[in-house]
Amino acid sequence: MTDLAEPARPAAPPRRRDAGATRAAILEAARNAFAATGYDRTSLRDIAALAGSDVALIPRYFGGKEGLFTEALKATIAPDRLRDWDRSRFSRDVAEMMAGAADIADPRTRTFQFLLQAATSPTTAPLLGRAVQERFLAPIRDWLGDEAGQERARVLAAIYIGFLVERLIRGAALEGPERTAFIERVTAVIDGVIGPG
């Protein structure tokens, strides 16, 4: 009898894994999950499922849930955003942004949701405090560049966060005379903190 079967092919090389892409997918999934449901109500299985990866990879790449949260927090607070911002336009730019609608798809809105969730958990609030100091207040202080920079940075952060909350609660963009007055007053408040451009 003749064997008509095809000759055996060599085995396909194992699929190459991309650790960097997997780590990035887990980190992005964590940022989204922590923003949506907070630290305490988010499981590593939830994050792995969102990332399309094995839950066992999270401890390998991040050491566990707290390590993943810390990395997600660092990725969320970008310390270099102010570096190239034209200081003479900063107050007005922020005022115009705050007069607009809170767009849930806007990465800044998701960032703020992540930070709000972190602030409400006894587990993550201390981690948030350190990250805010290092990655938010310190760059603002450096950008302001004077001996009172730390105090002014804290006041500016409080004003900014307050306007973010107001915008999220309001939802819709301001219009007409109310928008104009809002932009002018917010610009004046921020100018009063940061000083001349």
Image (cartoon, rainbow, N blue to C red):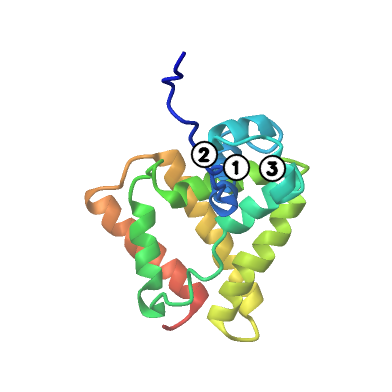
Residue 86 showing in the rendered view: yes
Q: Is 74 situated above or below 101?
A: below
The residue shown at (71%, 57%) is: 129
> Which residue in the structure is indicated by mark 2?
10
Q: Nearer the viewer, residue 58 or 132?
A: 58
Q: Nearer the viewer, residue 141 or 48?
A: 48
**Type of amino acid at the residue the image marks with label 1:** Ala
Q: Nearer the viewer, residue 161 or 11?
A: 11
> Which residue in the structure is indicated by mark 3?
58
Label located before the other in sequence (3 or 2)? 2
Mark 3 residue crowding within 10 angstroms, few (<14) / some (14–19) / many (20+): many
> Which residue in the structure is indicated by mark 1?
30
Q: Are marks 2 and 1 in contact (CB under 8 Å)?
A: no
Q: Secondary structure at mark 2?
A: loop
**Type of amino acid at the residue the image marks with label 2:** Pro
Residue 75 lies left or right of residue 189; in this view the side is right
Residue 48 horizontal/vertical position (percent): 61, 35
Comparing labels 3 and 2, the label whose residue is closer to the camera: 2
Residue 196 horizontal/vertical position (percent): 43, 83
